[in-house]
Image: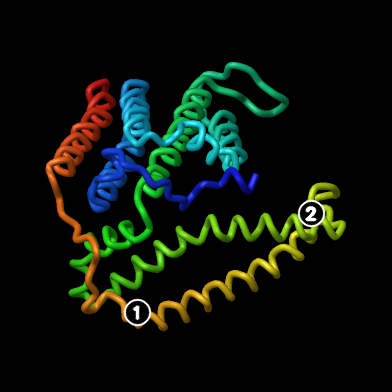
Amino acid sequence: MLKDITIGQYFPGDTLIHKLDPRTKLIVTFLYIVALFMAEGPVSYGFAVLWLVAATAISKVRLRLMLKGLKPLLFIIIFTAVLNALYTPGRILFTFYFLNVTYEGLVLAFFMVLRIILLITGTSLLTYTTSPIMLTDGIETLLNPLKRLKVPVHELSMMMTIALRFIPTLIEETEKIMNAQKARGADFESGNLMRRAKSLVPILIPLFVSAFRRADELAVAMECRLYRGGEGRTRLKELRFVRADYAALMISLLFLISVIAPGRWIR
């Protein structure tokens, strides 16, 4: 299960999406999220699916890899679908004991599950195709206006990127600790819920110790390299918008309109 978590991983490539400015990808991702939450009806979601398929094909990120990242969230997706199917009022299709399954509930559950899948897989493309350094520079540049309000923009963007970058590292560390504990006879799968929770203690304590040790080593390494935050800091690659970035932003705006408009017209 831990191997299925791909959040925060970066897969180098030479595709058009990899070459886009990180600010462009952040804005496009934001518009994509807005479009998903404003989508209504099969036509709107159809445009969203086509957009995701096209972006995945251009980025050359394997669809199997993106769907693999959904496995750890499978319980949440199913739980959300069941709640929407059972507790949405409307025409009752059948009754299971005291629970009523309605037609409107099934439709809402389907679109809700589709929205979650599109949201997770679509936003994952941002980290799959953007290196942590470029992502930090993009977030910092977009948040630059907040510096006038004395907001530590560089530090915030750096913390966000480091947190994303360390997710795969902590997952790998967790897997190593679990294998070591299993070799010592630990059992994490049998017993009731309380017993399984207690069995996680031998994993959590070494994991926290390892996380704090890695954080301390990272802080020492940054200090040894005279890291002083964003003030006076230069970049190896300066961020510049090119024609491809402007084209991507225009296409994203058209996508937003194509997703929102059908639901408004049907009304």
Q: Mark 1, residues whose alpha carbon is within 10 Å: few (<14), some, or many (≥20)? A: few
> Which element is circle 1 on?
loop
Q: Tag 1 or tag 2, which sits nearer the N-term? A: 2
> In the rendering, which numbered label is found on residue 196?
2
Which residue is tagged 1? 227
User: What coloring was used for the rendering?
Assistant: rainbow
- Near-viewer residue (73 or 14): 14
Task: Indicate whether 225 appears above or below 97.
Answer: below
Residue 150 image position (x, y, % from top left): 24, 78
Query: Splitting the image into 4 quarters, where does residue 96 fall?
Result: top right
Quadrant assignment, res 195: bottom right
- Image position of 260 (left or right of 60): left
Q: Residue at x 69, y 58 (%)?
A: 176
Say what amino acid the circle numbered 2 marks: Arg
Q: Is residue 155 left or right of residue 19?
A: right
Residue at (24% x, 32% y) in the render: 255
Which quadrant is the N terminus positioned in?
top right
Taking depth in this image into account, of 28 and 211 the one nearest to the observer is: 211
Mark 1: amino acid: Tyr
**Residue drawn at x 59%, y 43% as measured from the top left:** 4
Q: Position of residue 2 (x, y in %)?
A: 63, 48
- Percent coordinates x, y for residue 227 in the rendering: 34, 79
Please tell me the numbered disc located at residue 159: none
- Spot the residue most to the top: 93
Q: CA distance from mark 2 to mark 1?
A: 43 Å
Quadrant of the image containing the C terminus:
top left
Judge by depth and name the residue closer to the eye, 75 or 13.
Answer: 13
